[in-house]
Amino acid sequence: MVSPSQKALVTWNMAAAGRRGGHYIQKNSRFLFSNLEQLWGHRSFGWTPALRQQAAESHQESTETIVIPRKKTWSKEAVLEALAATVSRDPTAYPYQFQDDPYLSPKTSTEFKLYSLSQESGRAAAKYFVNSNPKFFTKDFAEPHIPCLMPETVLPLLNEVSEEALKERISLRKVAAAVDMYDQLLQAGTAVSMETSHDLLDLICFFGDKNPVQDGEPQTEDSEESGEEVKRRKGRGRRAADLLRSTWRENNNAERIFNLLPEKDERCYSAMIRGMVKHGAHMKAFSIYTDLLNNRLTADVHTFNALFSAAPEVRDTYKERWDLMTELFTQMNQQKVQPNLLTFNNLLKGLKRCGPMGKTLALHTLNEMRALGITPSLASYNHILGVFFKSASAGQSNVDILQEMMSELAGSSFTCQDPEDVLFFCSAMKICLDSKDLELGYKIQSLVEVGENWRMLGDSFYHSIYYGRFFNLLCMMEHIDVVWKWYRKLIPSLYYPNPQGVKDLLRALDTDSRLDLLPIVWKDIKSLGHDNKPDLVEELLSLMDREKHSPEIQDSFATCALDIKSTYEGNRTRLGLEWSASSLSHITSLLLRANKTQEAWKMMQLFKENNRVPFDKLMEDFLSACRSDGSPQRAVEVVQLSAAFCLRATPRLAQQTLAEFDLTEEQRAILSELESAAEPAE
């Protein structure tokens, strides 16, 4: 009998012998294969040059080290983004923000603005109620915890006079309370740390020494303004922007606290300069900057950015403005401050106020940006467009600037780096519209469709302006089939056309003889809320009534005319839509062409009710319709109606009726009397 320990030992020895044998075979096989490869390499029948090259590549690949890639970390929204990428935009759907409440789906630009503001107002009201009454919202049901759904601390909790209480008021953005607490600390002889003083100055300068406007609280105009601001506005009327803009008041709390500081460092000066520029005290900002230099301090890049934006406001001539901005750049170099994107954008924005010399300087500035490794943003290109197209004499050479930009930007995806990035696409499309360059307009639209570049169109106002200009360009320059395709693609999911946009579409339909689409356009006019615009409705009616079409089209026109008639009758209480002689005549004529004589006769009665006089041609068309229907009595009534309106065509209509209809003696007597009564008046 063999014991278990002896079996294990035998197994171990066999395994060891197997490992040694495998190692020996592997070692000798490499040597053997190497010798065989060298031997076969000299035999022409065994290895061709192609096979030798393939063997060498496979041998090289086998000796390379395999690198295992690291685990990729996906974002939390990666799955949602992947799913969203599989679904294209529905051109017939309303914007996503309104899909939670189908009743509030906007059909016009006015409704879009109203519903958007209503939603935002409701959120602000709910947030205000939650924050004002935190005791009613103490339970947290969300798993995991969602901080934004819980009440925020909006009232100070520390009432004692301390620096901690001051920090609390600063964090809550209570400007007046923070200033009052700071004054109490100084009166008590308590020193305030420099860091807290910095935060207090930042708060006061940012909000202009006023508490930020709370939800629902109206923003009032400042009663006190700096002398500089009054002087700058002297000689021109007050604008709406002046009523909403916050101004820098003389000797406000920011200046008082700044003067009370025992030590002033770069951050103190920076807060004052940026606050003064933000609130319109440009000359004071440069005065504070001079004090900074006199105290042998250096400014940071944000301070210089504010000074660049204020430079055009403190100089009168083009050359003086450029010299000042050049001097600021020299001082940045001396203080070893590296400019950033906003620095060059503010410089380019200032060049728009430097006249003709700005064109050369703008291109030079763009080259400097690239030399420093700073990639221009959309705001940079927008400012350059403003420099080149500000003058009314912008020609084809200036359009080439936009062509070069689009060639450079094609296929790029952008993120917002400057608040004025959202102005580029509107400005570029305006240039395309003014120059009637359809190809360039398509390039701009293609750039908008790359990635999420559509976010760079701005808010709903700029969004509507951009697509309005693009659609106007299409209506002027493109074939109607392409225009109609874009019309169905953009409306109503992206664009709510105004009455002028609909008129552009009507003219495009007229140019390419596609008036058969007018009934569809009328339905859209109703849904867009433009059915109370008399000039738009009458232009639509005149296009349908201008010439005769096939019976099918005339039937659709008549149905559309009856719908327009019901719109007139249902809008008696609405302002702007009243019956006119032309609208009544167009609808009547359309009904006659579709052989709807009874409805047309009802329209004739509306002339009397609304004190309107029909045209002579309409009465002739009505008489022709009576001839086609074989209705002599209706023909006599038409002549009587013409006589009641004292039309000059009455004798001629009476003669035609006497000659072309089979009348009774009574009818002939009536027509003869009307003919003789109308001749002296003629």
Image (tube, rainbow, N blue to C red):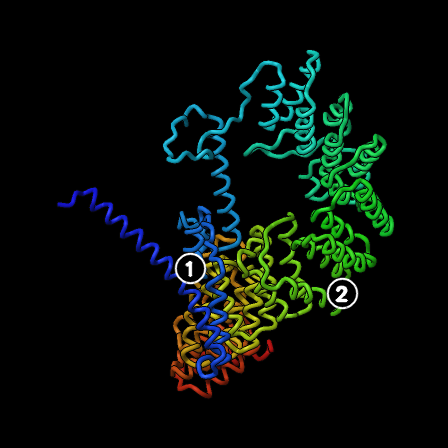
Which of the 4 image quadrants contains residue 366? bottom right
Q: Position of residue 466 (x, y in %)?
A: 60, 59
Which of the 4 image quadrants contains residue 24? bottom left
Q: Position of residue 223 (x, y in %)?
A: 72, 31
- Of residues 417 and 467, the one drawn nearer to the viewer in this rendering: 417
User: Residue drawn at (36%, 32%), measured in percent from left and top?
Assistant: 141
Q: Decide: is 551 above or below 245.
A: below
Check whether the beta carbons of the residues at disc 2 and disc 1 lie within 8 A of each other: no
Q: Relative to residue 414, is residue 358 drawn left or right? A: right
**Mark 1 Cα shell of 10 Å, populated few (<14), some (14-19), many (≥20):** few
Q: Where is residue 607 in the image (x, y as percent from the top left)?
A: 49, 66
Does the image show residue 465? yes
Q: Relative to residue 478, is residue 608 drawn left or right? A: left
Does the image show residue 235? no
Which of the 4 image quadrants contains residue 523? bottom left
Q: Where is residue 478 in the image (x, y as percent from the top left)?
A: 58, 73
CA distance for labels 2 and 1 = 43 Å
User: Which amino acid, by three-letter code, is at mark 2?
Assistant: Ala
Query: Which residue matches tag 2?
Result: 394
Q: Residue furthest bottom?
A: 659
Q: Relative to residue 436, is residue 94 drawn left or right? A: left
User: Residue drawn at (62%, 14%), measured in percent from left and top?
Assistant: 161
Q: Which residue lies furthest to the front in this view?
A: 1
Q: Decide: is 254 above or below 244.
A: above
User: Which amino acid, by three-letter code, is at mark 1?
Assistant: Val
Give the mark toward the camera: 2 or 1: 1
Query: Which residue matches tag 1?
Result: 87
Circle 2: element type:
loop
Q: Decide: is 184 above or below 60.
A: above
